[in-house]
Image: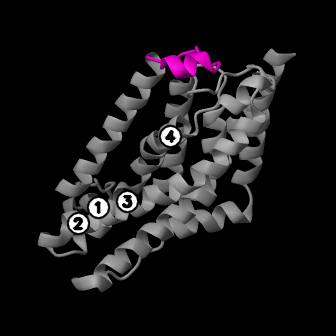
């Protein structure tokens, strides 16, 4: 094989532009902030039944149903936004790169900002029903609840809706170089990616939110699977592998619960 053929056959490295690098730094900052909050629970979260360091504020597995009404919606939404940035944005670095490289240099930072803001706003809007669902589930057996969520996520991995959502995440869009049309096109591109990711990843995000033990490690594992699924060249094989792993972990939690 010639040197040129070897270069073409080698996997391509993603050389991030400055704007994409800054987004990667923001993802790292979201992880640091999330872990710090888990390690240093606030007095309010401890008072409402979440003393364990691995829990989201006011989301203590096995807590009493009476504490459900005391859930701090602002804290829950803030934690959901941090989770969204930490878990969903890593898979969007190629999209950020696409926005930057298809925009004039002087407008790259503003274009990437519009994309990221729209992307996170969509996730934030979805955080409200997620908080309501988690409040409804508050007080149920944690192991059984997590196993059920994992089994549902595994089944969802193999549905046509999941495949269509992943396809939506990979759609490109023409980006006008200047003016309000550029801002609108970038915002629409952010909406396309965010809506596809929400439909694709919501079962995994919900399962990560109710992990009963070592939640930072669980979220890190879910982040790896979501990013792998988003960036792999063989999405069908990836979905099958992820579904199998979800089912295996769910079965382990069922055995422990018995």
| Mark 2 or mark 3: whose residue is earlier in sequence | 2
Let me know if residue 100 appears in the view: yes
- Residue 103: x, y in percent? 22, 74
Q: Are marks 1 and 3 in contact (CB under 8 Å)?
A: yes
Q: Residues within 10 Å of mark 1 (few under 14, many from 20)?
A: some
Q: Which residue is mark 4?
A: 223
Q: CA distance from mark 4 to mark 1?
A: 22 Å
Which residues lie in the magenta part?
40-54
Q: Which residue is mark 1?
A: 113
Above or below 19: residue 211:
above
Q: Residue at x 72, y 65 (%)?
A: 160
The kind of secondary structure element at disc 2 is helix
Q: Which mark, residue 110? A: 2
Q: Residue at x 48, y 22 (%)?
A: 38
The kind of secondary structure element at disc 1 is helix
Q: Residue at x 77, y 44 (%)?
A: 152
């Amino acid at each position: 094989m010639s040197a040129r053929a070897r270069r073409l056959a080698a996997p391509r490295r993603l050389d991030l532009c400055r704007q994409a690098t800054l987004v990667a730094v923001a993802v790292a900052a979201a992880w640091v902030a999330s872990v710090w909050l888990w390690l240093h629970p606030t007095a309010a979260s401890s008072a409402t039944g979440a003393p364990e360091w691995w829990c989201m504020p006011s989301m203590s597995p096995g807590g009493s149903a009476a504490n459900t009404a005391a859930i701090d919606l602002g804290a829950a939404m803030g934690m959901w936004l941090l989770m969204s940035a930490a878990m969903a944005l890593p898979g969007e670095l190629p999209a950020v790169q696409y926005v930057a490289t298809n925009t004039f240099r002087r407008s790259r930072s503003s274009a990437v900002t519009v994309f990221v803001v729209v992307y996170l706003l969509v996730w934030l809007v979805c955080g409200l029903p997620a908080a309501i669902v988690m409040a409804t589930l508050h007080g149920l057996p944690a192991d059984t609840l997590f196993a059920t969520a994992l089994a549902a996520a595994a089944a969802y991995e193999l549905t046509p809706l999941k495949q269509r959502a992943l396809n939506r995440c990979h759609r490109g869009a023409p980006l006008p170089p200047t003016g309000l049309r550029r801002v609108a096109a970038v915002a629409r591109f952010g909406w396309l990616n965010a809506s596809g990711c929400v439909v694709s990843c919501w079962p995994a995000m919900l399962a990560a939110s109710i992990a009963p033990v070592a939640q930072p490690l669980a979220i890190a594992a879910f982040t790896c699977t979501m990013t792998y699924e988003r960036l792999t060249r063989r999405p069908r094989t990836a979905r099958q592998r992820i579904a199998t792993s979800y089912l295996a972990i769910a079965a382990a939690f069922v055995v422990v619960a018995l």
